[in-house]
Image (cartoon, helix red, strand yellow):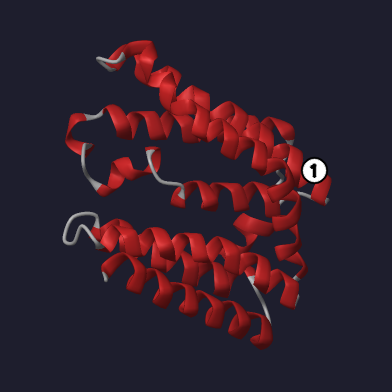
Amino acid sequence: MKKLRSLFFETDMSWRRVLLFAVATAVLTALLLVLPFTKHTSLANIGVFPESWILFALIVILNCKTPKEAGFKTFIFFLVSQPLIYLLQVPFSSMGWQLFQYYPRWFVATLFCLPGGMIAWYVKKNSILSALILSVANSMLVAIGAYFLTSFPHYFLSAVYCFALAVLFIFTLLQGKRQRLTAGALTLAATAVSVVYFLL
C-alpha cells in the first residue's frame, strides 16, 4: 500500500515527466488499438472508455503541489495524449485521417480537465470533502463497470478492473475511517444504481 501511495503522492510530476507520461500512455493506447489480437477485447477499451484515463489523471493531479498546477498539468497531459493516439493510428487504419472525427468529444473532455484537475487535487487533503470528490470518480468507474456487465461474459475483465480500481482508490488515496466509510458508502450506492439501470 505504501508503494501505491508513493505513486500517487510522492512522484516528482515535473512538466517534463507530464509530457513523457502523456506520450507513453498515448503510444500504449495506440498500440493496443492497432494490434489485431486486441480487437473487441478488454485491452482495447483504453481507447474507447475513460476508466484508465481516470487513473492516469489522478497520478498527475495528486503529485502536484497546488490546485492550479494540477489543473494545468492535467489539461496539458490530455491535450498531448489524446490527439497523439489518433495520429499514431493513422498509418495502420483504413480510415486514415478520418479517425480524427472521433477526437472532438475527447477535446471537450480535455477542456473540463482544467477545472476538474483543480477540484480533484483536494482528494489529497484527506477530508470528508476529499471522500466526496473521490466518490464522483468512483461513481464513473462503477457505472462503466456496470455497463460492461451488460455484455457478459465479454468485457468481464474490464468490469472487474473498474470495480477493483474504485476499491483501490478508497483504500490508497484516503486515510481515516470516516473518509473511507463515506467514499465506500457512496460508491456502493452508485454501484447499486448503475447495476439496476444497465442490467434491468
Quadrant, the N terminus = bottom right
Q: Is residue 65 left or right of residue 156?
A: right
Query: Residue at 72% across / 41% down in the picture?
Result: 114
Where is residue 76, by image quadrant?
Answer: top right
Q: Quick one: label 1, few (<14), some, or many (20+) residues within 10 Å?
A: some
Identify which residue, 90 or 6, lies in the foreground. 90
Amino acid type of disc 1? Glu
Looking at the image, residue 42 lies above or below residue 35: below
The quarter holding residue 79 reads top right
Residue 35 in the image, given as x and y percentages of width and height: 24, 29
117 left or right, relative to 148? right
Q: Would residue 2 be visible to someone looking at this image?
A: no
In the rendered image, residue 150, in percent from the top left (x then y), is placed at: 24, 61
Image quarter hosting the C terminus = bottom left
Q: What residue lies at 67% left-to-right and 86% top-to-bottom? A: 178
- Viewer can see residue 133: yes
Residue 128, position as x, y percentages in the image: 73, 77
Residue 27, compared with residue 55, is above or below; it is above
Give the SS element for disc 1.
Answer: helix
Q: Is residue 115 left or right of residue 177?
A: right
Q: Which residue is mark 1?
A: 69
Q: Residue at x 66, y 42 (%)?
A: 112
- The image shows a total of numbered marks equal to 1
Q: Position of residue 56 (x, y in %)?
A: 55, 47
